[in-house]
Image: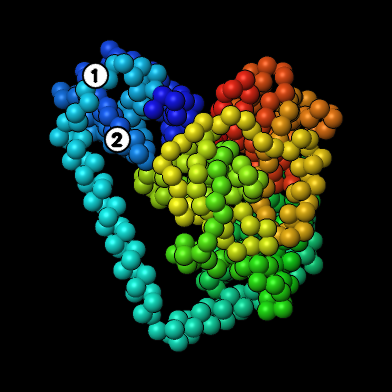
Amino acid sequence: MSATWTQEQILALAPDASSAKNGMALATSRKWLSLGCNEKAAWGYFQGSGKNPYQTRIDLTEPAFKCTCPSRKFPCKHAIALFLLLVNEKQLFTQNSPPEWVDDWLEARSERKVKQEEKLKIEEKTKKEVDPQAQAKRAAKRFQKVTGGMQDLEVWLRDLVSNGLAAAQEQPYSFWDDAAARLVDAQASGVARLVREMGSISHSGTGWQERLLSQLGRVYLLIEAFKRLESLSIPVQADIRTQIGFSQNQQELSTQSGVNDSWLIVGQSLAEEDRLKIQRNWLLGKQTQQKALILNFAHGSQPLDISLVPGSFINAELVFFESAYPLRAIVKTREDELTQIDTMPGYSNISNMIKEYSQALAKNPWIEQFPVPIRGVIPIKQNNQWFIRDEDKHLVPVKSIFKHNWQLLAFSGGYPVDIFGEWDGEYFLPVSVWGNNRFINFGF
């Protein structure tokens, strides 16, 4: 285990910075009454403030965690501490026969996995039995609703532009939300999100006019493309439908052949929208150099999938969603073994990054986050704005929501490091960094 996992990788599993900090503080033997492990699991009794010690356990094959503490965070600080101890001080784990509460948990997890597989088989069988005519009728009805919504949106958009951008800035948020709500009713939730974002853009400070005009252009391009949907190639049709809000069936994707490679998990980020947690896992194929995005979702206090560990390689088969510039994918099959990152591949300079970004936009103009691994750059600060600079002295500004600039600068020590981040065409958002044989995932 110690050869596979690093402290940085374990801390990257923490749901927030405070959990990581507290986990490190509890990763000391005097806090634990007993510790044990075998090839499948690790466990321990932690004496908290209550009468009974907490029972903390880790399924090392996933990994997965469970603790009897009252925390609603996942994994909790005790699970993080136990994992850190296992990696850093494995000699403390003297037991190799799991107690009953560990065996019962592992058995329950195994049973749930079998039931999930059976459920998927039943759903697949049921799907095959669905009346194709009824299914086609429902699809046609939705398409008709979306068409009406897009037609109404075009009228609304033309009125907005004819009144001028200055008038748009004076509109309250309800103006944008009402337009978005009508699109949701028309079952075009993807376009609704783009419209809702305009309200924030119009109040985003200096340069808001250019940003709003750019967003208006993307939406108008989507309207025009939808009018000509049937005349476009299948991959472009898929991009248009995805932007509008149509989903691609993941069960159908899982039946297709994918791309086999050793995939480097170059970064993982987390965002939250209306209690929906959105996890973006960025992968890069070692042989194919193919970029991939694995999205995971969890609502409220539900746990996210943490089996993709930033800074490690997995041997897996990925199936990509249909697109003119494929990025999003699902993991069809994978090996359980993780191996540590040994190098960060990437663009040699910012010019090459911008060139490929332009080529990607030519294929899919609605790309919002473009994955950028770039080598040999230095974080710098000029006039209260952070940048990353390559060896040719080219600069790209760092997005203001990134709060780890000083940590990134300290990590680099003023010397070039390899950084992975997301580029939106205007700002760069660092996600992870590699240097001096160390990997850090910021996750923001």
Q: Which residue is mark 1?
A: 94
Q: Is residue 265 left or right of residue 239?
A: left
Q: Secondary structure at mark 1?
A: loop
The residue where tag 2 is placed is: 40
Specify the quadrant of the image occupied by residue 75: top left
Give the answer, above or below, for where 277 lies relative to 135: above
Q: Residue at x 68, y 62 (%)?
A: 324
* Alpha-carbon span between mark 2 and mark 1: 15 Å
- Residue 16 shows up from this direction: no
Left or right relative to 442: residue 126 = left
Most extreme residue toward the right is 392
Res 431 → quadrant: top right
The C terminus, quarter of image: top right
The amino acid type, in three-letter code, at marker 1 is: Thr
Badge 2 or badge 1: first in the primary sequence: 2
Mark 2 touches mark 1? (CB < 8 Å): no
314, above or below 340, in the image: below
Q: Nearer the viewer, residue 273 or 196?
A: 273
Number of other residues with Cα within 10 Å of mark 2, as a class: few under 14, some 14 to 19, many 20 or more: few
Residue farthest toward the top in the current orientation of the protein = 30
Q: Position of residue 246 (x, y in %)?
A: 55, 68
Tell me if 185 is positioned left or right of 91 in this view.
Answer: right
Q: Residue 123's x, y, as percent?
A: 34, 69
Q: Among all residues in the image, which is located at the extreme bottom?
A: 133
In the image, what residue occupies the spot 76% across and 42% down? 353
